[in-house]
Image (cartoon, rainbow, N blue to C red):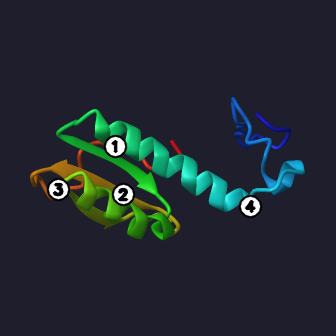
């Protein structure tokens, strides 16, 4: 916790090849690629449903992944913070109720 009482966090394994660490790769693009790869890995394990909070800018790329792997994608706004949306992917369709007890992106 910081001196002013706010929570702090750090990466367990920082992206050392990004521009902010002197590397050649753009930070936001590198993070988006890592998040996309996480979705790809999870969906290739063929769960019935997976959902996470994401930045809206990643949704078009996730939509292509959903089509490629035959998942239905649903996107729901996250009212407390419009910089996040709830993305749900369901194999062969599924429930449209976003109130499944998942916490917001801030934890």
Task: Please say whether residue 105 is visible from this viewpoint.
Answer: no
Report the Cα–Cα distance between label 2 and label 3: 11 Å
Residue 97's tag is 3
Task: Please say whether residue 78 is visible from this viewpoint.
Answer: yes
| Mark 2 lies on residue | 86
Q: Residues within 10 Å of mark 1 (few under 14, many from 20)?
A: few
Q: Which of 2 and 51 is in front in this view?
A: 51
Q: Is residue 7 above or below residue 90?
A: above
| Mark 4 lies on residue | 26
Residue at left offset 73%, top offset 42%: 15
Mark closest to the chain's N terminus, 4 or 3: 4
| Mark 1 lies on residue | 102
Pointers 1 and 2 in contact (CB under 8 A)? yes
Mark closest to the chain's N terminus, 1 or 2: 2
Q: Which of 93 and 68 is in front in this view?
A: 68
**Of marks 4 and 2, the one in the foreground:** 4
Residue 78 position in % (x across, y down): 40, 63
**Of marks 4 and 3, the one in the foreground:** 4
Report the Cα–Cα distance between label 4 and label 2: 25 Å
């Amino acid at each position: 916790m910081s001196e002013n009482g706010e929570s702090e966090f750090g990466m367990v394994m920082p992206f050392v090849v990004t521009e902010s660490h002197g590397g050649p790769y753009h930070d936001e693009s590198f993070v988006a690629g890592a998040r996309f790869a996480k979705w790809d890995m999870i969906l290739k394990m063929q769960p019935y449903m997976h959902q996470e909070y994401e930045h809206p800018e990643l949704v078009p790329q996730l939509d292509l992944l959903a089509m490629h792997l035959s998942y239905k994608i649903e996107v729901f706004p996250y009212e407390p913070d419009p910089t996040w949306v709830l993305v749900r992917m369901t194999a062969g369709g599924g429930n449209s109720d976003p109130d499944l007890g998942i916490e917001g992106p801030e934890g």
